[in-house]
Image (cartoon, rainbow, N blue to C red):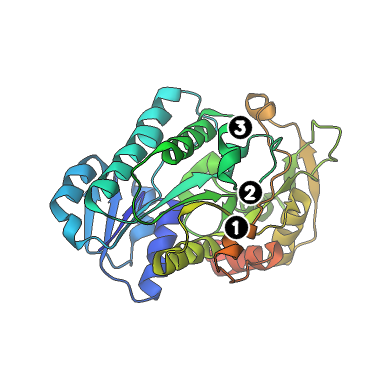
Amino acid sequence: MIVITGAAGFIASNMISTLNMMGYRDIVAVDHFTDPLKMKNLEGKTLREMVDRRDLEEWIAANHRFIQIVIHLGARTDTTEFDKTVFDRLNLNYSKMVWQSCVRYGLPLIYASSAATYGIGDQGYEDAHGLIPLLKPLNPYGESKNEFDKWVLRQEEKPFFWAGLKFFNVYGPDEYHKGRMASVVLHAFGQISETGQMKLFRSHNPAYRDGEQLRDFVYVEDVTNVILWLMENRPQSGIYNVGTGKAATFNELALSVFDALGMTPSISYIDTPADIRDKYQYFTEAKMEKLRGVGYNKPFRPLREGVTEYVQHYLAGGKYR
């Protein structure tokens, strides 16, 4: 059995699709299963069982002999939430429980970290373990992910294989439920389809022109391919970046959406909301040498290619993966 937490969420539901496509059917989905919109992400997918996240520790204790791997993708991911206790409970402490269960029963573990751990990037974007204690995330979400990474590296007892994955800006199908936290691609599609125009955040940093803020946008299927490869190959354990390794501007992203829709570009700029302005990342770009160095050699989709697939194959028809 393959156990996947956060199963009704964005990346995890795509992971189930990837596993199903590769012939894996013995999948245990773990989540809170209360959001009807998120539950649509699981429609049509082949699962063995659904387990409420509150019951996971007991369930693993009763079923560990049959588990092949735990893929822990569940988390509170709202970067605009500033109640630290929420992240302590749902991200940090819950992840510690998952880790300890995997150690106790000899189970391999892949878990989601985040590029939000890098903060403004003053330490760069290299996934070296020695840099992790120096990172200063910009919000409680990023802090919770970095605190868990630091905790993991301090543990003397570890699963015989484990990997923490720092996801960069992931976009793709099955993110309809994410609201404000959905990818810029989804927001751009909605704006452009309704108004024929796209409003991007104005730059409040003199080093960047409006719309020229840079992010490493990575297509969700490329992310799930990395997880699948790690699951099947189990290279050196550690914390790895998962991005394309090539940053692109928000202007490029918007132009890609216009092009995918066959529409003439019309872009304007609005102030970045005050509540996130001083926590805003102006540049992210994954250093991918570490993952490449352990043998992962699949290419990552360029932004325009990924956006075109997402818009034309999914968003234009309101389809799920």
Is residue 128 at all visible to an observer of this figure? yes
Q: Which badge, 1 or 3, comes first in the chain's sequence?
A: 3
Q: Which residue is mark 1?
A: 290
Q: Which mark is drawn over residue 134?
A: 3
Q: Is residue 274 left or right of residue 69?
A: right
Instruction: Name the spot of residue 200 as percent of width and height, x first.
Output: 74, 42
Q: Which badge, 3 or 2, comes first in the chain's sequence?
A: 3
**In the structure shown, which secondary structural element does the residue marked by tag 2 occupy?**
helix
Q: Is residue 7 left or right of residue 174?
A: left
Instruction: Name the spot of residue 4 as percent of width and height, x first.
Output: 33, 55
Q: Which badge, 2 or 1, comes first in the chain's sequence?
A: 2
Q: CA distance from mark 2 to mark 1?
A: 27 Å
Q: Is residue 43 left or right of residue 84?
A: left
* Residue found at x 59% / y 71%: 297
Q: Which residue is mark 2?
A: 184
Q: Measured along the vertical axis of the image, is residue 66 above or below residue 87?
A: below
**In the structure shown, which secondary structural element does the residue marked by tag 3 occupy?**
helix
